[in-house]
Amino acid sequence: MKLYSTQHQSPDVSLEEAIFRGLPPDNGLYMPLTIEKMDASFFETIQERNFQEIAEAVCQHLLGDDLSQEEIHGIIQQSMTFDAPLFGLEKDVEVLELFHGPSMAFKDFGARFMAAIMSHYLLKSKREIRILVATSGDTGGAVAQGFFNTPGISVTILYPKGKVSDIQEKQLTTLGGNVQALEIDGTFDDCQSLVKQAFLDEELREKFNLASANSINISRLIPQSFYYFAAYAEAKRKGLKLPIVFSVPSGNFGNLSAGLIAYQLGLPVKAFVAACNENKVVPEYLQSGEYHAKPSVETLSNAMDVGNPSNFIRMKLLAGEKWESVRKLVKGYFTNDLETKARMKEVYDRTGYVMCPHTAVAYDGLQQFKKENPGEFTGIILSTAHYAKFLPTVETTLNRQVPIPERLSSLLSKEKVAQSLGTDYASFKQYLLGK
């Protein structure tokens, strides 16, 4: 696979270089030069394959020039050790549960795959690297778990002070070992800005082999495409109505971009719903054709509190580049906190299903889409995190206690270890340099 920079000011690179660079020198994002559709026969018989077999087939198609079939098999078997089942919520609405991995969030798919493929290359080259990653909630826990004690890799995670849930914070501040947490007195956008500046700093690049585990890294998006294919396979097994509309709770837009990669590979999809909270710059762009980044607004669905989504350019390119083409495939809606809580309560009272705030935003986005686009299709909402990661919000909204999985409840008694920093780059750089 050859990749280019979206800024077109840096040379094309190999998959390995794109993974370890994270960002091109011109501050663009890496994108595949070409994405060729998979054979129609793959989709005709996809329901006969399990998740791991689907992941291997997609990997072989995309990365077969970079990795052998045996290497791909090893990476998938090491990283994809859990499934993404569909839960039938109501007529023509399914929930794609992406929280069955170690950190109980969808980012386990990307983080574990990335750790496995990086480890593969590092063992061959006998190098060491330092991962820098900003998190608005779930990325940090997934990266911490995915890279914990991986030989040759140290991890520094930046998260916004007071803007992640207690369990999310404990997931990224209690492992220790090769994982360090930085509590930044600012927003997620501030954390992301610090990471981007570090990647463009030649002094740091010379001292450390820096790599990113955010969704700006292409190796995060590739494995996230797997569960879109798996959802289609299970929809066929269950005899659900086709076509499918995916409703994706969206913040940095890596998840939706991964769905668009699946679409470009030939996955039959009617539309993608970009379901946002009050950080709604993309729905506004889809409505007006004009994109205006804004400071992020704090909401209940905190992992989506992003005012300047890094993957916006990828979404545009994958959906057709021109505004008219993008808005035909991607439909944008937003849901405020009051509406989010109302959806959580209404769905629970009617079905007994407990949703996290992000899942509720996806459900509400789908309902808005259905009002504007009546017809025969199955809506699949992506449930990106287990509800217990947002316990205070869930329990006050539903007015009841809900069960907590042991792997999450056991975190609450552990001691948080994090370094506090402000948002100025100079202090962050001095910290990285050990001064």
Image (spheres, grey):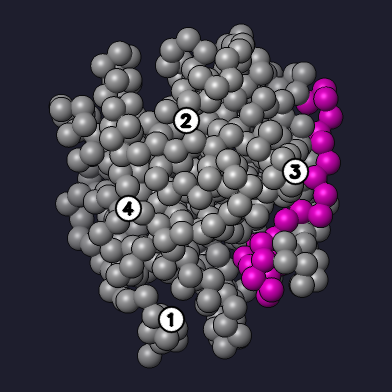
Q: Are marks 4 and 1 in contact (CB under 8 Å)?
A: no
Where is mark 3, residue-wise? 320
Disc 1 versus disc 3: nearer the observer? 3
Q: At numbered mark 1, what does the secondary structure look like: helix, strand or loop?
A: helix
Q: Nearer the viewer, residue 77 or 55?
A: 55
Where is mark 1, residue-wise? 425
Residue 365: give its label.
Answer: 2
* Quadrant of the drawing holding the N terminus: bottom right
Q: Earlier in the sequence, mark 4 or mark 1?
A: 4
Marks 4 and 3, Cα distance to the nearest angstrom?
31 Å
Where is mark 4, residue-wise? 298
Q: Amino acid at mark 1?
A: Tyr
| Span highlighted in magenta in the image | 15-42
Q: At numbered mark 4, what does the secondary structure look like: helix, strand or loop?
A: loop
Local packing at callout 1 (Cα closer than 10 Å; few below 14, some 14-19, many 20+) is: some
Q: Amino acid at mark 4?
A: Glu
Check the image and report above or below for 259 versus 161.
Answer: above
Q: Amino acid at mark 2?
A: Gly
Q: At numbered mark 2, what does the secondary structure look like: helix, strand or loop?
A: helix
Q: Earlier in the sequence, mark 1 or mark 3?
A: 3
Farthest bottom residue? 435
Q: Residue visible at 48% across and 70% down?
A: 193
Q: Nearer the viewer, residue 385 or 55?
A: 385
Q: Residue visible at 31% across and 39% down?
A: 337
Q: Are marks 4 and 3 in contact (CB under 8 Å)?
A: no
Percent of width and height locating residue 382:
49, 32
Local packing at callout 2 (Cα closer than 10 Å; few below 14, some 14-19, many 20+) is: many
Q: Is residue 277 left or right of residue 110?
A: left
* Quadrant of the drawing holding the C terminus: bottom left
